[in-house]
Structure formats: structure tokens, C-alpha cells
Image: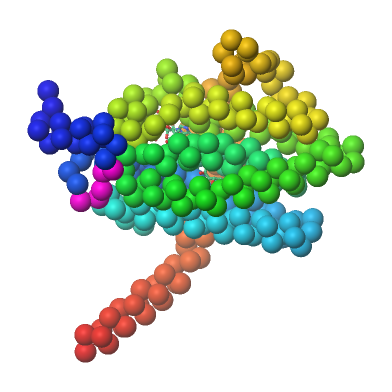
Amino acid sequence: EMSPEEQHFQDKIDNDVKIEPKDWMPEDYRRTLIRQIGQHAHSEVVGQLPEGNWITRAPTLERKAILLAKVQDEAGHGLYLYSAAETLGVSRDELIELLHEGKMKYSSIFNYPTLNWADIGAVGWLVDGAAIINQVALQRTSYGPYSRAMIRICKEESFHARQGYSAIMKMAFGTPEQKKMAQDAVNRLWFPALMMFGPSDKDSVHSEQSMAWKIKVKTNDELRQQFVDQTVPQIDYLGLERPDPTIKWNEERGHYDFAMPDWDEFFNVIKGNGPCNADRMENRRKAWEDGAWVREGLLEHARKKAARKVA
Ligand code: 3HC
């Protein structure tokens, strides 16, 4: 039985009235948003590591400049999202501490290594491609600050996917050795990219409630299907082999049939046992500690400035 506030809240959700920070909301709605937005922000920040690793080794100055711009964008996306999470009464420092303590997650895809330059192309094309599909849907999320952050992030994301596709295209149409590298990158990153959409709907613990509250406007499987339908023709265009031999166009469904990732691997990776989990966290803790003196200096400067104003 819903209380009058809950009923009023649900009416707003059902009528696509955005929920704003000052509005009444069920505690679980707030908690789910802090969890999802916080983990989304962590994904943006940790997501800089695989690509950051290649900025100094980009094959040309132009590619270095493009990658630098993309990694910088991801830091900004993290900032927007931490700020959106802060409107729910949690601080960025708390969220980052929970991440470092292993109590919050970030997208599993970033626990896979980027072994060579073809991976950088495949990451831009597949990982940002998947993130765009997820984030375009999230522009319609019921929580105002999150929806507005998504609208702004989506404006920058398309460049991320396009630059990746153009990098991998150069290799797919390049020398036989380059084409082999492009094929290997797609083979290694395809199933981890499918995992970005979360477990299948029947195994998704949060989906039902998140859909009822329009935190999620499309289910994990719907978005995954959209990603597959969009990406298979691109793989074909590149003249690369499909990384999943069972992929097949299904006329009556009007979609591609495809194999699901190995969910045991997925749950193992999000439990912390992926190829790169340990050094991603090590990297983040070190960056946090190395940056402490900058934060303290800025805070001290802000305090002095505020004190001068008062005096
Ligand atoms: N990686 C890590 N954890 C994942 C995951 C993934 N790919 N998919 C699901 N999970 C976790 C969920 O967080 C949840 O665990 P929790 O309760 O501890 O949070 C559990 O698995 C069950 O999954 P559910 O489907 O029930 O959970 P959700 O309803 O939260 O759906 C989601 C998962 C689709 C990822 C949803 O949280 C979401 O849309 N999040 C916002 C999008 C996001 O985080 N994107 C990151 C992509 S990378 C990125 O943005 C950077 C890009 O710019 C390069």
C-alpha cells in the first residue's frame, strides 16, 4: 500500500516529471541512484587508465592529440557524474573511498588489458559505442541531475566512438599484420563489451525496480541487442570475421541472434578477479594519494580567500 508521498512520487514518475534534488523521494530510489551514478562516475575515471596507457605510445602526433582529448573528456564525465551523485547527499570523497575499499564497482570492461594500438581503436569503437547506447537511453532517466549530465556527456561521446572506428578501420584496411591485430582486438573485446550492459534481464536484480522508477528506461537485454544490431554490419564492413560465429540475422525477429558472454567470467571479474582489477585499484589509490597535496593546497587557499572576504 503506497503512502500519499509515494503515490505522488510515482505519479510524477509515470508522467515523466523529473525528480529534482529537493523533492521527496523513497530512500531506495536515492540509494539506487547513488549506487548507479557513483559507479558510472567510477567507470569514467577508471576507464581513463587503459587508454591513458597508450598516450605516450600513439603512432602519430595526431593520434596522440585525439587520445589525449578523449581521456580528458572522460575525466570531465566523471566530474559531472560525481556532481550529480552529490545532489543526493553523498560526497565525492566518500564515493571514491568506497571504490578504493572495493565496496563500489566500475564497469567490468576496464578490467581487461589494452595490449596494443588496435585495442585502442577497438575500445573507442566498441566500448564507447556500447556506452553511448546505454547513455542515450539514460538521457530519459527520471532523476533530473542525472538526465542532464547524460545529455551533456552524449554530446561528447560520439567523437569517442568515431575516432576509435577510424583507427581500427585504418588497420583493418592496412597491411595483413595490421588486419590480424584488428581481428585479434575485436575477438578479445567483443564479449567483454556485451557484458557492459549487465546480466541478462532474468538475472538482473535491480532492473524491475529501476524500470518502475524509470531510472532505467530500457532493459539490459534491449540495449545489448541494439548494440549487436548496430555493430555487426560495421564488423562486416571492415572485412573482419564476426567474433561470435553463431551471430545470424533473424528475419522474423528483425534482429541478429547472438551468443551471450560467459556470465561466470562476468561475475568473477566484477568480484575482483579480472585480469587488471588489482592494478587498476592500485593505480587509482596512488593517483589519489599523489594528488592529496594539490587538494590540500586548494582547500587552504579557498579558506584564506574566504577568511579575507570576511575580514
Ligand atoms: N560492470 C560492473 N558491474 C556491473 C556491470 C558491469 N558491466 N553490469 C552490472 N553490474 C553490476 C551492477 O552494478 C549490480 O551490482 P551492484 O548491486 O553491486 O551495483 C549487479 O551487477 C547486477 O546488475 P543489474 O543489471 O541488476 O544492475 P543495474 O540495474 O545497475 O544495471 C547497468 C547495470 C546497466 C550497468 C546500470 O547500472 C547502468 O546503466 N549504469 C550506468 C551506465 C554505466 O555505468 N556505464 C559504464 C560504461 S563505461 C563508461 O561510461 C565510460 C565510457 O565513457 C568509456
Would residue 243 be seen by someone viewing this image from the given angle?
Answer: yes
Query: Farthest right residue?
Result: 175
- At which x and y percent is residue 96? 40, 52
Q: Quadrant of residue 6?
A: top left
- At which x and y percent is residue 225? 55, 24
Q: Nearer the viewer, residue 105 or 238?
A: 238
**Looking at the image, which residue is at 47% across and 27% down?**
220
Horizontal side, residue 105 vs residue 5: left or right: right
- At which x and y percent is residue 306? 28, 81
Residue 154's place in the image compared with 311, above or below, is: above
Query: Farthest left residue?
Result: 4
Query: Farthest bottom residue?
Result: 311
Residue 185's place in the image compared with 68, above or below, is: above
Q: Quadrant location of the N terminus? A: top left
Q: Quadrant location of the C terminus? A: bottom left
Q: Indicate yes or no whether the magenta region holds residue 260.
A: no
- How many badges with numbers are in the image? 0
Ligand 1, by image quadrant, is top left
Would residue 95 be seen by someone viewing this image from the given angle?
Answer: no
Q: Which residues are magenta?
A: 18-22
**Looking at the image, which residue is at 56% across and 36% down?**
130
